[in-house]
Image (spheres, rainbow, N blue to C red):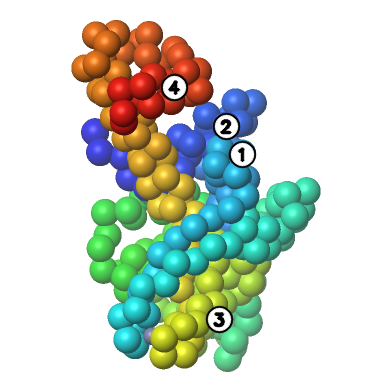
Amino acid sequence: MVQQPVERALMLLAAASPPALPEALAQLSIGQRDARLLQLREWAFGPQLIGLASCGNCGERLELTFNSADIRLLPSSQEESAETAVPLSVSVDGYEVSFRLPDSLDLASISGETDGVTFRGLLLERCILSASHENAVIPAADLPGAVVTAVAERMSEADPQADIRLALTCASCGHHWQAPFDILSFFWSEINAWAYRILREVHALALAYGWREADILAMTPWRRQFYLAMIGE
Ligand SMILES: [Zn+2]
């Protein structure tokens, strides 16, 4: 079965926090989930993150180096802030909307939707608890654009870690822009690269010495590096 990104996030978190129930992890807001992924990534690979971006104006490639602390908006002690648990609300132009923050279950339920506008509409429908206009109840799908925008803004204000943007400046042309940063895809590709590197090491050592995979994996990284150096890898 091909794993969806949402499932990857929950699997990583479940592996790192055994006392937490999977259902509880799935119900964290996306910002709370990402704060935990960021912490986990720091434990696994250290605080420094290195990424690549290309300038939308001149195409120049930029290498970005930053730290977990630069993109952590909530101290981990405040990660379970009260605001993410209670229903939120907005009142705009006579519309009263009560809603909650999206969680991993919401994202998983609509992960097959590729159209951005439809995705946003479905997500909103799941998260809106009640909507009314001058005291008459109305379906979430009938809310005007301005109200929908107010709801989306309130959501990202209440859960800022869910929407991390990096302020970038191109050294060649001076172009400024904001690039979204997704800890999940970043961390997942690092894990893939790490797994691929280990497999290459096993391949090289098995080929050179005829050792079994299990024995090579049981070695300390230092010993593996020593033998790899001996065979010129
Ligand atoms: Zn540029």
Q: Which residue is mark 4?
A: 226
* 1 vs 3, front mark: 1
User: Which numbered disc covers residue 150?
Assistant: 3
Q: Amino acid at mark 3?
A: Ala
Which mark sits nearer the N-terminus, 3 or 2? Answer: 2
Give me the C-alpha separation between circle 2 and circle 1: 10 Å
Question: In whole angstroms, how far apart are the C-alphas of marks 3 and 2?
Answer: 35 Å
Q: Are marks 2 and 1 in contact (CB under 8 Å)?
A: yes
**Amino acid type of the residue tagged 2 in the rendering:** Ala
Point 36% across, 73% down: residue: 61
Residue 191 or 9: which is nearer the viewer? 191
Residue plotted at (64% across, 26% down): 19
Q: Which residue does the numbered mark 2 point to in the structure image?
A: 16
Sequence-wise, which precedes: disc 2 or disc 4? 2
User: Mark 1: few, some, or many residues within 10 Å (few <14, many ≥20)?
Assistant: few
Question: Where does the image place residue 182, in percent across and percent down from the top left?
Answer: 46, 59
| Camera-side residue of 72 and 216 | 216
> Which is more foreground, mark 3 or mark 2?
2
